[in-house]
Image: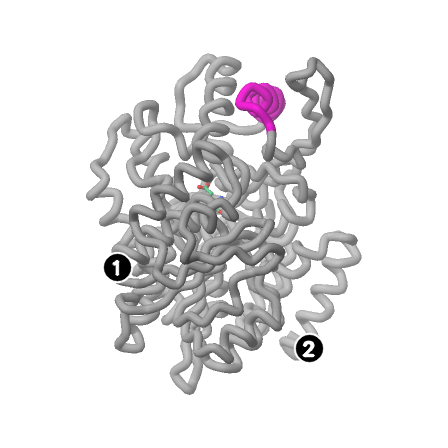
Amino acid sequence: METSPERYVETFMAQLIARNPNEPEFHQAVREVAESLAPHIAASPVLQRMKILERIAEPERVVIFRVPWLNDRGEIEVNRGYRVQMNSAIGPYKGGIRFHASVNLSILKFLAFEQTFKNSLTTLPMGGGKGGSDFNPKGRSDNEVMKFCQSFMTELQRHIGQDTDVPAGDIGVGGREIGYLFGQYKRLRNEFTGTLTGKGRDWGGSPLRPEATGYGVCYFAEEMLAARGDKLAGKTVCISGSGNVAQYACEKATQLGAKVVTLSDSSGFVHDPEGIDAAKLEYVMELKNVFRGRIKEYADRYPQATYHPGERPWNVPCDVAMPCATQNELDGDNAQALVDHGCMCVVEGANMPSTPEAIRIFQQHKLLYAPGKAANAGGVATSGLEMCQNSMRLTWTPEEVDAKLHGIMRNIHAVCVQYGTQPDGYVNYVVGANIGGFMKVANAMLAQGCV
Ligand code: GLU
């Protein structure tokens, strides 16, 4: 390489930004990976000549479509649907579907890009993809959600398939939505295949898929702490979010002996200094999953807890932070507050929840810090296990799936340590995950030629 790794990153990013204007989340995700890989690419003429990074940052295909549907008042509503098919070098496109008012191309491209590396880290044969819609399911009836899902799938079905692209859930898409999406897929295609993951247990879903992301985050945290001779037991944990990932991170952290003191939603957070134990978590699960209520209600139910409207939980003193809500939910000031209060470990359950400034602060202070693409990979890994069971037309026991999930998280941790250990012994998990995830995809792309 003629220029320094720093110059390479700047030139590469300038071109990427010019080609993809107004996509700040996508730029952020790509920059982080480019910075990690630059020294590696600088040392490899073949990666440069074959334009591997340039190709990885260009989706193989993007589908954008109209989603018209009838609401309960009989009116037509129009949303926009997307599927970003990012990379199929190591397997069919694989990644979730997000329904949220904020969904746009930038967010889905960042998620699909991250997914490519995350899926590679799982060691399972899955490429990277992501999809979704700006449809906001909040306040919608079951009937409206079903109507929307059916219209969304009516178009999406022609672009996916068990050997092509296998969607799953993400923010705003859980068991209910996967059911409606799968029903419509099956009806239109006249086939019962494992084209979606996160299905119900009685109709092709894997045991432990709902639990997998949150459990995996805790297994990863245990590995990080063990490397410093420590463990989760006895730790105070702050969790953001109160959806699927947050709920099962809370459950597993508590089972492992930690005390979880916060949960949040987009309106604020609750702080329960006595800990959110199994019984209280059961209440939260019913509140969020059945009644689709707000986390504020937790503080009405448990008076020792306080509700903090419009705030995030990062000012609450803790040993371990698990951001499990959404991208860029933890900024530089939040990171500094965590450091000041003695936090030692940050494990991301969400995708890219920490801003670049927050990551700099964690790493400057030598915190154990794991990016989402490593720490939250347990979800998609278990989706990969669901695909495997569907192909075999068999179901494993929860114990079997848990053992495989645990093994995968341990292995991802080992890969991060292998590629991310710095000369002073500090493990840079960002570099470790980016290089570890990249290698397999890059080698596959080199083998498959200019496609
Ligand atoms: N949406 C999840 C993720 O960010 C899961 C994707 C999947 O299971 O395919 O990894």
Question: In the depicted view, which residue is nearer to us: 142 or 36?
Answer: 142
Residue 102 bears which disc, if any? none
Q: Element type at marker 1?
A: loop
Which quadrant of the view contains residue 83?
top right
Question: In the depicted view, which residue is nearer to us: 235 or 51?
Answer: 235
Place of residue 96 in the rendered image (x, y in percent of width and height, measured from the top left): 51, 40
Place of residue 79 in the rendered image (x, y in percent of width and height, measured from the top left): 70, 29
- Foreground: disc 2 or disc 1: 1
Q: Element type at marker 2?
A: loop
Q: What span is colored magenta in the figure?
A: 140-158
Residue sitting at x 44%, y 81%: 422
Q: Would you say the beta carbon of the disc 1 residue lies within 8 angstroms of ligand 1?
A: no
Place of residue 408 in the rendered image (x, y in percent of width and height, measured from the top left): 31, 54
In the picture as drawn, the residue positioned furthest to the bottom comes out as: 424
Q: How many labels does the image show?
A: 2
Residue underneath mark 1? 256
Residue 3 bears which disc, if any? 2
Q: Which of marks 2 and 1 is nearer the N terminus?
A: 2
Question: Hey, what amino acid is under mark 2?
Answer: Thr
Question: In the depicted view, which residue is nearer to us: 388 or 295?
Answer: 295
Q: Quadrant of the N terminus?
A: bottom right
Question: Hey, what amino acid is under mark 1?
Answer: Leu
Disc 2 and disc 1: Cα gap in Å?
49 Å
